[in-house]
Amino acid sequence: MAALAGILKDDGHEVSGVDIDHKVFTEGELLKRDISYQEFNDEFEYPNDVDYFIIGHNFMKDEVILKIKEKNKPYKEYHEFIAMYFKNLYQVAITGTHGKTTTTGYFYYGLKKYVNTSMLRGDGTGIGGFQNNFFVYEACEYKDHYLVYHPNTIIITNIDYDHVDYFKTKKQYNSSFNKFAKNAKTVFINYEDRNKIHHKNLITFGENIKADYYYKNLELSNGIKGEIYYKDKLIKQVEVPIFGKYNALHILAVIAFLHHNNFDLTNALDEFNKIPCIKRRLQQKIIARDVFIDDYAHHPNEIQASLDNVRLMYPRHRVVAIFKPDRYSRLVEFQKEFKRVLLNFEKAYILPLYESTSENSILLKANTRISYIDTLDQLITEEKLMENTVYLFMSSKNIDSWLYGLATSKELTY
């Protein structure tokens, strides 16, 4: 919603909003554009001077809709508005279980030097402008919301069973992506997931040389360096200061799209040297010999990918996980996988579950390397004497108070 608000402001609309009284990391983008919002509560008065209401998923409640109808104003839910508002632009929808936000950012930087491009990204970043003719956006699979979109091209980063509170089986989850794929003329997909999608115009990218687009001589120790091939033909040399195998695959998807659509690849990655950090994707704060990283990882495979990246970036540091689970359903479904990946850290701390439930996340407690803690003071006490450490804070929810609390305590120690 913050990203959409930014786009509408760029397009010349007057934008304001209503939200819960709770800090969310995306609100920084609203402040940059001077977009105000009020607290939502039972006493909130819906303004009379609004021409259109766009409703976030969590606010699609009878009492909210009734109040808007009383104003006799048009309204749409978030995803339905996007489908309507951008219908005349060339749309590139980025979907998949992991890496949607990052890949959307990479596509924007890959495309904007060729064509005027708008972007909607899950970290609250939205870039608009009526002169733009391309729209790159993040399309989330949760509750099948993305099925209302009919993009020209869909990029599927990967398909890895998730959102188990809604999709009860892997088959149902995979079927959702297959339905969405039918809404586009062209689908690019990670080679490893090619058999999960049935589409007449399916283009693959990946590590395997059987993919349509693939790497040779890929090096990840000091950024991403390698050669990209289409079939058996070298099409692009890549060298960018970005870490990690998954990021290499995201970049590969961008190059595959550009090449397939006949864009000149000569300077295709120039803008990648200027990419600002995507919010809550390995955002770093360095204090003396310690590094504090804020990351969105909340699925076992995402946690492993973040750990792999950190070990490439800081090979001589001790790496500690501070993980705040978000949904109890995900915690239960993947408890073995969570335990396995958290044991790959030198130490892991599990914070209280974000979701309101009578249960908690203590079921992840495996041994002395995985500890369950309730308070920031406990974390500070455990880590006050440790140095040369990367603290990887991970959650789909806000975890700022833990990160800055520990960082401040360590800063005072030095």
Image (cartoon, rainbow, N blue to C red):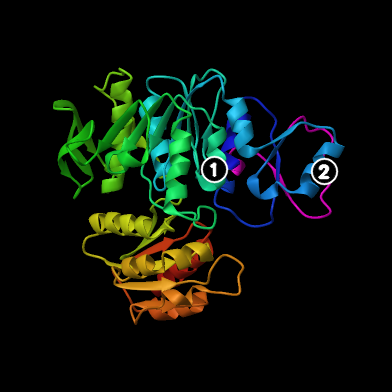
Image quadrant in which you'd find residue 365: bottom left
What kind of secondary structure does the magenta stretch mostly adopt? loop
Q: Which residue is mark 1?
A: 144
**Residue 338, image x, y percentages:** 38, 66
Which residues are the magenta region? 30-52
Distance Cα–Cα, label 1 vs label 2? 25 Å
Quarter of the image with the C terminus in it? bottom left
Residue at 84%, 32% in the rendered image:
72
Q: Is residue 349 left or right of residue 260?
A: right
Q: Is residue 42 magenta?
A: yes
Q: Is residue 111 above or below residue 17?
A: above
Quarter of the image with the N terminus in it? top right
The three-letter amino acid code for the residue at tag 2 is Leu
| Tag 1–tag 2 contact (CB < 8 Å) | no
Q: Is residue 105 above or below residue 162?
A: above
The disc, 1 or 2, on the residue closer to the chain's N-terminal end is: 2
Q: Residues within 10 Å of mark 2 (few under 14, many from 20)?
A: few
Q: Which residue is mark 2?
A: 66
Image quadrant in which you'd find residue 53: top right
Residue at 76%, 31% in the rendered image:
74
